[in-house]
Amino acid sequence: MVKSVSNYIGLLILFLALISCKNEEKKITTKKETRPNIIYVYVDQMSANMMSNAGNTYLKTPALDYIANNGICFTRAYTTNPVCSPARVSLMTGRFPGYFKDDKGNEIRENRGSMKIPTVSQEVQNTTIAYYLKKANYELYFGGKEHLPESLTPAALGFNKFSDDERGELVNKAADIIKEKHENPYFMVVSLINPHDICYMALREKATSKNDAVLLKRAKVELAALGEAMKIPEGVSEEEFYSNYCPPLPKNFEPQTDEPKAVKSLINNRPFRKNAREHFTENDWKHHRYAYHRLTEVMDKEVQVLLDAIKNSGQEENTLIIFSSDHGDMSASHRMEHKSTLYEESANVPFMAMWKGHIPKGQVNEMDLISNGLDLLPTACDYANIEGVSDARGKSLRPLFEGKEVSWRETLGVESEIGKMVVDKYGLKYTRYDVDGIEEQLLNLKQDPFETTHFTNDAEFKDDLERLRQIYHTEWFK
């Protein structure tokens, strides 16, 4: 009898152990199955305020609104560097562009230098977003604009490059991939060009350098898209067009009080930028803004193709969609167009995320400082259930996406070809320009959101100036 009871107990323990193992196996399997596909929609030259969900009434962006309404939108997201190639180096590596040196040993801060980054170190190769996600058994896809040095192209890093197009063909091919059955989750970058075509409006007016002439000669598609965006609606007079159809001139249309010499240098170094500032009429600037908004709507329609493919194939509940831009456009602020400045229009970018059933919908985060160049890598790795670290200052956005209370950074660094800056969560910006001597500025986005002046010499902000100056040197740009 005792032996029988003993055998029974032994069998019970064995049964419970097997059940426990099965449950544990189920947990592991479930965890693996909840790893989402990740689609990063990365557009070119779009400022943070260029969405109707951001309160902009001069355009309609239903696709972007859908992402925002069904997920989270950050209003204080910044690029690592507000120009194309350096920002894209950050996308691939999770590092500041300035971490890298060009073929002459100079710090990377602008497009030409960025394209001359030589072969990257083994440490960099082993800490790219592609390296980590391949390690997590993600399929890798990249389509659209690259603008990267040879050592950091998608092909070099192991992506499947599925399209060289940057427009409609790109999103149609991406949609085909989305509809396919995949054994493993995938990470896809859809790199759309627009609203970047706005660059050609000022360029075609004063393309004086050989490089500018080459750009224009190759830009048949871009110029055609710009021409379409600039069309005055049929039956509308010019007077009515500029009065009622075009967005008004921005509140910071005039150059900043005590404008830094570095900003003047940036403008004067490219004849087409100087020509725009000095010779564009107010109607020219309004027309520029009108076309910029129309080109953004073109891009929104392309994003809709992706959203339709995800929804119609039943993939919304296993797909994390992240949307952002490499940088913005000045769009007539301070009588400037193009990018590369540290003003908000150029450096502050859209950043949104949606994953139905996992990210609470309708969130707007107006406080936390986001770096799309530093934070995307650890975020994607977090959702892939793998730790990914490149620059240790990058942070996974997952807890913010999911509405959790979390300790977050209080300051954030941004580089540019004319200087660098640190912004803080209170809306203060310390900018240190360095191309025409050292120039310091303290700006206050709460008191002066359009950056019409600066507070550098204001006694009330003396301590803030010194605090951010120290943070600049000790935490961001030693």
Image: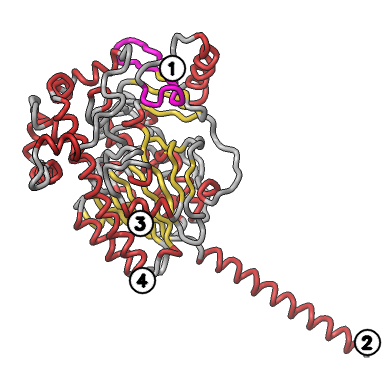
Evaluate whether residue 159 shows in this view: no
The residue pinned by badge 1 equals 442
Residue located at (42% from left, 65% from top): 184
Element type at mark 4: loop
Element type at mark 3: strand
Evaluate whether residue 462 shows in this view: yes
Q: Earlier in the sequence, mark 3 or mark 2?
A: 2
The residue pinned by badge 2 equals 2
- Decide: few, some or many residues near mark 3? Use Cα within 10 Å; few <14, some 14-19, many ≥20: many
Give the percent coordinates (x, y) of residue 194.
23, 45
| Pick the front one: 474 or 229 | 229
Magenta span has 37? no
Give the percent coordinates (x, y) of residue 265.
24, 16
Q: Amino acid at mark 2?
A: Val
Residue located at (9% from left, 32% from top): 204
Q: Amino acid at mark 3?
A: Leu
